[in-house]
Amino acid sequence: MTRSLRFLYIFLFLAILLVLGLWSLRSFMGFSTSRETTVLNGHWTKAVETHYDEEFPIKRLGTNLWAALDYKVFNEGRPGVILGKDQWLYTDEEFDAVANGEQNEADNLALIQGVRDTLKQQGTELVLAIVPAKTRLYPEHVGSDKPAALHTDLYQHFHAQVDQAGIFAPDLLAPLQTAKDKGQVFLRTDTHWTPMGAEVVAQQLGQAIASKTPLSGDPQTFVTEAKTSEPYKGDLTNFLPLDPLFSNLLPKPDDLQQRSTNPAAAEAEGDDALFADNTVAVGLVGTSYSANPNWNFAGALKQALHSDVVNYAEDGHGPILPMLKYLQTDAFKSNPPQVLIWEFPERYLPAHNDLTEFDPKWIAALKGAPEKPRAAQQNLAENANNSESPNRAQN
């Protein structure tokens, strides 16, 4: 290499570094931190370092290139998503085998029975809403990857077990399959159902509750309004880090028409009467299928049941942890609902739950089994996969 070429090489290298450095500095134009983040406690420096690392152009370029290679050449995404046909995406929790799945199923079924018994002691009727897997409703879009044997008959097995235990669990699979002819009941790029799918389930539950355990009190009227349909990038696209360089490779966004449900005009005028009676007729506990307002599940239940619904569902914690938390609240102990709907996606039956935050004696009493030492519970939690991986994408 001649001297002039050596100087040219050095100059180009320094120029590239300078350009990339200036490019990365653009990200600080909108950068801000909270008042608690100061230079003295070191938090500000850490925040700047983290922000710079996330926005550094070479890192983004490498991430996008590698994701594009996986997506186009190997037809794969990051752990958390399974690519189907026709731009359909599925959560890998509906495909993967689960370590200690049989033991987890037995533990979770024991907890479900314990929850039913605890509710019954307070005069509350449990209605278990087992949500069928997306792969079960849309198997025609599943690609070369197939669900593990554990998931083949999981929905039917779940229903058989709770039916044997005497737990009320209306079938939701048949009405959702029928509704597919009228519209999409699950989103193509998301883990969750559509507002239409949520409404179908709510109507089925409303009919079942009306025949099994009619609600007391005067029926209320609710009105649901549909908003304008807008493009929606589902949570599963977060496992395809193709933005911003290869965003054109991403599956086409879903069309999401959100809905809102409110009391009818005559009901709204009688709010004073409603506040005078603090009795809770219907409670709702569950996952992001219930907690996320995009699907309007709680609103659809209000209209189907002709009753107000108090929503205790949580994002990102699966179905069991929100229920256990609810059972320990003053709201349940002092004012239990007449009916409690527990929305429970089928894939969480064999999933492990970290219950170390709860009193082991209470958990053992719920299961009707001898107490396990807390150290054993902690060890099990560290060596098992926690539930709710779809919300790893949301969070």
Image (spheres, rainbow, N blue to C red):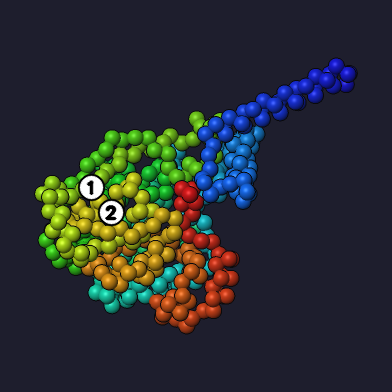
- Above or below 6: residue 194: below
Q: Position of residue 94 (x, y in %)?
A: 46, 55
Say which element carries label 1: strand
Q: Where is residue 221 in the image (x, y as percent from the top left)?
A: 14, 52
Q: Which numbered marker is on residue 261?
A: 1
- Give the quarter of the image for residue 68: top right
What amino acid is labelled 1 in the image?
A: Thr
Q: Position of residue 54 (x, y in %)?
A: 59, 40
Residue for point 20% across, 52% down? 303
What amino acid is labelled 2 in the image?
A: Ala
- Above or below 156: residue 93: above
Left/right placement of residue 49 relative to residue 258 reads right
Front-most of residues 219 and 390 = 219
Quote the CA–CA distance across marks 1 and 2.
9 Å
Q: Where is residue 337 in the image (x, y as percent from the top left)?
A: 25, 67
Residue for point 50% across, 30% down? 248
Dot 1 and dot 2 residues touching (CB under 8 Å): yes
Front-most of residues 51 and 147 = 51
Q: How crowded is mark 1: few (under 14 residues within 10 Å), some or many (20 or more)?
A: some
Q: Which image quarter is the N terminus in? A: top right
- Above or below 112: residue 298: above
Residue for point 48% across, 65% down? 353
- Give the quarter of the image for residue 52: top right
Q: Which numbered marker is on residue 298?
A: 2
